[in-house]
Image (cartoon, grey):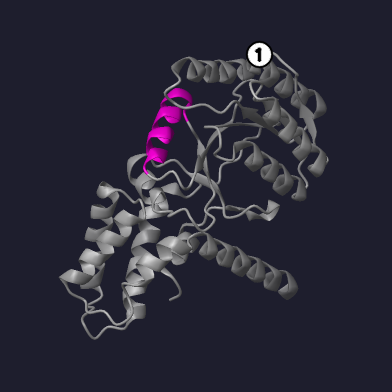
Amino acid sequence: MSGFLGLGRALDRLRLGRLKEGLTKTRAHLGAIFAGRRLDDAWFDDVETALLTADAGTFATQELLADIRQEVKARSLNNDSPAEALQAVVADCITRALSPLIVSETETNRLPKVVMVAGVNGAGKTTSIGKLAHTWKAEGKKILLGAGDTFRAAAREQLIVWGERNAVDVISQTQGDPAAVAFDCVSAGVARGVDIVLIDTAGRLPTQLHLMEELKKVKRVMAKALVDAPHEIWLVIDGGTGQNAIAQVKAFDDALGLTGLIVTKLDGTAKGGVLLAIAKQRPIPVQYIGVGEAIEDLQPFDARAFALALVGDL
C-alpha cells in the first residue's frame, strides 16, 4: 500500500510542477509582492495590480482583495509578519475564490455516458478529446469517439489519428450533417456497450448565431438516440484568451447549458487569472486543465494546486 501512496504523491508533485511551469507568467507578478515588502496600502495596491494583470477582471479582483484584507486582519498580520504568512493568506483566499469551479462527484447510472464537447476553433478542442480518450481508456473504460466537426476535414482526420493512437473507434462521415454523426455515434455507443461516448463538434464563434443553432440541433438529436443524452456538455476555452473567455462561456452556456469547462494552453504564456473571473461571473465546474502538449498534460482541476501555482512556493 505504501508503494501506491508514494506513487500517488510523486504524481501529485509532477502535476503541480507542470502547473507551476504553465502559470510562470502570473507567478512572477504575484511572487514579486511578497519578499521584503511592508504590509501597507502600497502592498495591497500591488496585489490588486497583479490580479488585474493576471486577467482576473475588476469584479473578481475587488472581491478577492476584500477577502485578503479581512483575512490579514483575522490572522493579526503586520509589518513584522514573514513573507510566507502573506503568501499563505493570498493562496488561501484564491483557493476559496476558485471553490465554485470544483467538480462535484456525480455519476450517471446510464451507459454509455455521452459527453458533447464544444468550443471555438483553435482552443484545443479536438486535441483535448484525444487526451481525454487516453486518460479514460487507461482507467479501463471503453471509449467511442464521434467526429462531429464535419466542416473541417482536418478536424475529422485529427480525431481519427487520436483514435488510432489510443486504439479507440471513431464514428465519422466524409460529409454530412453533424447532427447525423452525433446520432450515429450515440446509437453505436449503445449497441456496442461502451462506457463513454465523446463527441466533437464544429468550432465556432458564439456570434455566429446560425451555427450556434446548429449546435442546439446536435444536442437535441442525441436525445433521440439515448434518453437524457448528452449527459455532459463541456466547453473548451483557451487559457490565453483572457476576459474573452467570459463571453464564450456565457454564450455557450446560454445556448447549451454547460456542465463543465476544459481550460487549455496554460503553458507559460497564459495568465490563468481568468478562472477567478469565471468563478465569480459564471461558476461552471472546471473539469480539466491543459498545461502542455504531452498527452499526460491534461489534468483534473485542483483549486488548491492552482492557487499554489499562482502564488509560488510557501
Task: Look at the image and tell me in which quarter the C terminus lies.
Answer: bottom left
Mark 1 = which residue?
Answer: 177
Does 259 sit left or right of 127 as displayed? left
Q: Is residue 210 above or below residue 119?
A: above
Q: Nearer the viewer, residue 157 or 276?
A: 157
Rendering coords of residue 266 (x, y %): 52, 53
Around disc 1, counting alpha carbons within 10 Å, would you say few (fewer than 14), some (14 to 19), or many (20 or more)?
A: some
Callout 1 secondary element: loop
Which residue is at 73% across, 46% downward?
Answer: 134
Residue 45 in sight: yes
Predominant SS along the magenta part: helix
Residue furthest to the bottom in view is 80
Provide the residue span drawn in magenta: 243-257
Which residue is at 48% across, 25% downward?
Answer: 256
Which residue is at 64% across, 18% downward?
Answer: 178
Q: Quadrant of residue 242?
A: top left
Residue 288 shown in magenta: no
Residue 104 in sight: no
| Residue type at tag 1 | Asp
How many marks overall?
Answer: 1
Q: Is residue 113 above or below residue 100?
A: above
Rendering coords of residue 1 (x, y %): 74, 71
Q: Nearer the viewer, residue 257 or 50?
A: 50
Does 65 sit left or right of 128 as displayed? left
Rendering coords of residue 128 (x, y %): 63, 42
Does 169 sit left or right of 18 as displayed? right
Which residue is at 44% across, 71% downward?
Answer: 312
Residue furthest to the left in view is 41
Q: Quadrant of residue 45?
A: bottom left
Residue 252 shown in magenta: yes
